[in-house]
Structure formats: C-alpha cells, structure tokens
Image (tube, rainbow, N blue to C red):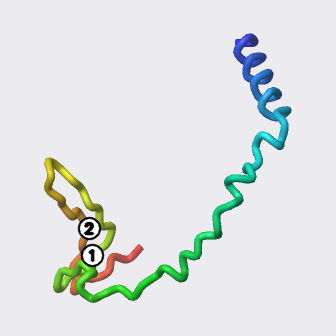
Amino acid sequence: MKTTRHALIAFAVALLSAPLNSLRATDAANDFAPLEIGAMIQPLAESGVFKVEGYFCWCPHLLKDEGKYYLVYSRWPMNSQKVAG
C-alpha cells in the first residue's frame, strides 16, 4: 500500500513540475483565425423539425445500423395531466 501511494505521489510531483511552456499552444496553432460560429448559424426550415401531432418529442438520437438510419426519441402526450412532484 505504501509503495503504491509513494508511486502516485512521485507521479503527481513529476506532472506538476513539468515546464509550463510544454503545455502552451505552439505558434502554429495560433495561426488559425477564430471560429465565428454565430456567423454560420442559419434559420431552421420547418421541414427540418421532427414533430408528431399530439405529442411533445425530445431527446432525439440518430442511429445507423447496416446502412439504415433510425431516429429514436422520447415522447409525451400533450393532453396528459401533469404529474405533481
């Protein structure tokens, strides 16, 4: 038990004493322009929304199996009573 603890402590000390420069990004990594995600957002077409009449749908997951795609999702009837909680 003591040997394992000593080995873990030695490993942690070695990690913490590593030069910080080796953890910083290189100049080549800084040559890229910042990613402007907001500028790439497009309006969503109504046809791009999965809906089932009379149900709330959430948690969609696309699965691929043997070349076929399946949409697995959760749903809850819109007209059901809310559960107190």
Give the left or right position of residue 43, taking residue 47 as reference: right
Q: Which mark is residue 74?
A: 2
* Structural distance between the alpha carbons of marks 1 and 2: 6 Å
Q: How many neighbours does mark 1 have within 10 angstroms: few (below 14), some (14-19), or many (20 or more)? A: some
Q: How many neighbours does mark 2 have within 10 angstroms: few (below 14), some (14-19), or many (20 or more)? A: few
For the C terminus, give its image quadrant. Answer: bottom left
The quadrant in which residue 56 appears is bottom left
Location of residue 47 in the rendering, given as x and y in whole percent from the top left corner:
23, 85
Give the left or right position of residue 66, taking residue 84 as reference: left
Q: Badges 1 and 2: C-beta atoms under 8 Å apart?
A: yes
For the N terminus, give its image quadrant. Answer: top right
Q: Regarding mark 2 in the picture, which secondary structure is present there?
A: strand
- Residue for badge 1: 57
Residue beneath the point at 53% across and 82% down: 39
Residue beneath the point at 54% across and 75% down: 37
Location of residue 2 in the rendering, given as x and y in whole percent from the top left corner:
75, 12
Q: Which mark is residue 82?
A: none
Front one among 26 and 18:
26
The quadrant in which residue 33 appears is bottom right
